[in-house]
Image (cartoon, helix red, strand yellow):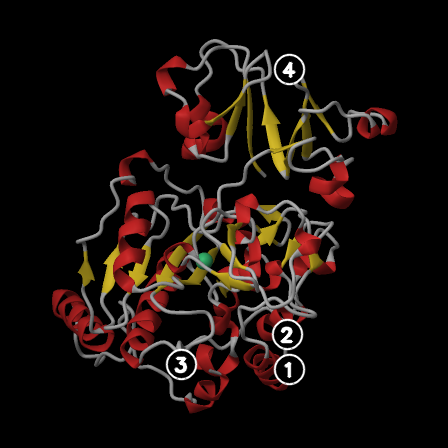
Amino acid sequence: MASGWYGFRRRGLPCSAGTATGLPGRLRGPARLAAAILLALYTCGFTFNNAYRSPRNSEREVRAGTSLIILHTTEAVARSALNKLSERGEAHYVVDTDGMVYRIIDHRRIAFHCGRSLWNGRAQVDDFSVGIEVVGYHNKPITAKQTINLAALIGELQSIYKIPDERVIPHSMVAYGAPNRFHPRSHRGRKRCGMQFAIWAVRQKLNLTAQPRFDPDVRARRLVNADRYLAQVLFGSTTQQDQALAKYQAVDTTVIGPGRSAWDIARDAYNSTNTVYVFPDGSKRTGKEIRDWSAIPAGTKVLLNEACADADPVESFKTIGTDGKTAADFAGEETRLATTYYIYPAGGSFSGSELSAEALAALPHGTQVLVGYKRVGPIRAGTRVYEICGAKWKAPDTYFLYPHGLLKPGSEMNEGKIPVGLYLFYKN
Ligand SMILES: [Zn+2]
């Protein structure tokens, strides 16, 4: 509720996050170090809990650099979020409502927390960021205990990686979506995750005094903005933030109606098997079963799968003739880009920039389309797929193309048995 935000006041937290500031100058050597540790414990007041360490730790590579701290909201209750995040290795830390800080993935290694993402021209934000999941919702204030320990954790990470306040940002600032039925171009607005951590009053509680004032990727036209209210919350003045929050509150419903599409409600989970549409006549269908998105009647209720709300849906290829008629149905205005791929039914793949307008207009029935991907190959003998895209080679939305046209997800491949001659497609 927006009214909750006004309860936040400008009162900084005294946490020294492991630095020795505030210590009496007469202490020297080991005494000073011991005092610093005690002070850090006293002011930061938490220890890490390792009960949900991810089994994925050893397979994740160490990041080459770290320039962002990304803040998420789980959009789910603690237990289901912790289990899922640990199992899949999708965060470095989780801060529970009681303030408990769980370590999931080692902070030096890559966690898969951002999904499809871009910041200041750089894609795959996971490769250069630390991710903190805060148990809670993008539009509801977090607890006082969470605030204190989150502030301490952020301070600690900022001092380890020398990250200034303006580079501690919410997931919604860096997430973007590939073209879909509702947006013909790659767009910001795919997620509202962590939205509240852009609100000035909330940031003050977290000791963060600076933040980005515009979206660098929208400004450079790499992306379009698909949600102007979200953009106002993320980058606006306090007045603009308040207005946008009030607007969100007023339209916060899960019923489709004028000006409120399936995407507005479910975002990138709109076509997921986990999103259920209840039509006015009482009949139900999952997002995956819906073909004609323009024919959903007003009054249809959207049921979101809470446990998966911050997870990135698996992006799968679309098929001409089954999921739509033309390339534009899937790739919108990006049909001719080098990052849109067409896999012919008989095998062979071409990017949008490699095909003529005539060929694009006459794609055969059964052509598979991947939007917003990178292609590498053919894989030669001795190539390790890990060296191409790290642990993401075995993601369910990474695909291997066999010469006869079969697209197989990375999650179904066996590392020791990847045939030579295949092409690998991974999310850009
Ligand atoms: Zn998130």
Q: Mark 4 is on which residue type? A: Gly
SS class, disc 3: helix
Residue drawn at 20 percent across, 73 percent down: 45
Which amino acid does the dot numbered 2 rest on?
Gln
Q: Mark 4 points at which residue?
A: 347
User: Residue 371, relative to residue 261: is it above or below?
Assistant: above
Which is more toward the observer, 276 or 428? 276
Q: Name the residue under label 1.
A: 240
246 left or right, relative to 77: right
Between disc 1 and disc 3, the foreground one is 1
For ligand 1, tell me if the residue under mark 2 lies within 8 Å.
no
Q: Is mark 4 within 8 Å of ligand 1?
A: no
Residue drawn at x 23%, y 78% is 23
Labels 1 and 4 touching (C-beta < 8 A): no
Q: Residue 348: image x %, image y %?
A: 66, 16
User: In the rendered image, which quarter is residue 319 located in?
Assistant: top right
Asked whether the beta carbons under mark 2 and mark 1 sit within 8 Å of each other, the answer is yes
Q: How far apart are marks 1 and 3 (CA)?
A: 19 Å
Q: How crowded is mark 2: few (under 14 residues within 10 Å), some or many (20 or more)?
A: many
Residue 205's label in the rendered image is 3
Labels 3, 4: front one: 4
Which comes sooner in the sequence, label 2 or label 4?
A: 2
Q: Mark 2 points at which residue?
A: 232
Q: Three-letter amino acid code at disc 1?
A: Gln
Give residue 77's position: percent from left, percent from top: 31, 64
3D distance between C-alphas at marks 3 and 4: 56 Å
Quadrant observed for ligand 1 in the rendered image: bottom left
Question: Residue 367, position in %: x, y?
Answer: 68, 25
Residue farthest front in this picture: 281
* Mark 1 crowdedness (10 Å alpha carbons): few <14, some 14-19, many ≥20: some
Q: Which of marks 3 and 4 is nearer the N terminus?
A: 3
